[in-house]
Image (cartoon, rainbow, N blue to C red):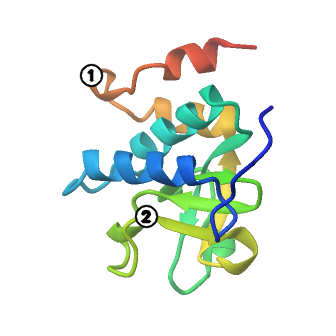
Amino acid sequence: MRKLQNKTRVGVPQEVVRQAMFIRRSIQGCTGNCARASFRLYKWCIDAGYRAHFVVGVWDYDCNGAEMASATFLNHAWVALDGWIIDITAGQFTDEYGVAVLQQSKAPQYTPFLSDKRALANVYKKWPKREQPSGIAQLLAKA
């Protein structure tokens, strides 16, 4: 796996942040696209050699996610990379962020529940066929 180099001041490589901003602009004005946008960034990171994780869980402003998270209640998706959360669609919850890049240890409003293949399988079965992002079926088919 590619080691993180040229970290930004927040600890995430600048090229990852640029890609997150590009994806964010491409879905501007859309809501409910957190899984699709996060999958695009996750796949880009994996293809670029980063050890990223696709995560689904609960985003809760009051930080009660651990009490709320279950297989039947997962309301958000994001990318985790070396202790950082990259949330392309954070703006749907608050006007504070466009793309949020936060240390996991300082982001109690994010409660992860599933990651990587289990997370992808969880969202894949909920997407209508015509809306499934390209590449997800191939990732799920890998051992």
Q: Is residue 34 left or right of residue 73?
A: left
Query: Foreground residue, 72 or 123?
Result: 123
**Can you say which quadrant of the picture contains the C terminus?**
top right
The disc, 1 or 2, on the residue closer to the chain's N-terminal end is 2
In the structure shown, which secondary structural element does the residue marked by tag 2 occupy? loop
Q: Residue 84 in the image: x percent, y percent?
A: 68, 62
The amino acid type of the residue labelled 2 equals Val
**Can you say which quadrant of the picture contains the N terminus?**
top right
**Label 1 environment density (alpha carbons within 10 Å; few <14, some 14–19, many ≥20):** few
Task: Write the residue at 61% across / 26% down.
Answer: 47
Q: Which mark is residue 99?
A: 2
Q: Circle 1 is placed at which residue position?
A: 130
Query: Foreground residue, 74 or 55?
Result: 55
Query: Is the residue under label 2 in contact with that under label 1 (CB below 8 Å)?
Result: no
The amino acid type of the residue labelled 1 equals Arg
Q: CA distance from mark 1 to mark 2?
A: 26 Å
Location of residue 32 with respect to 19 vertically, above or below: below
Q: Is residue 63 left or right of residue 26?
A: right
Task: Write the residue at 33% across / 68% down.
Answer: 92
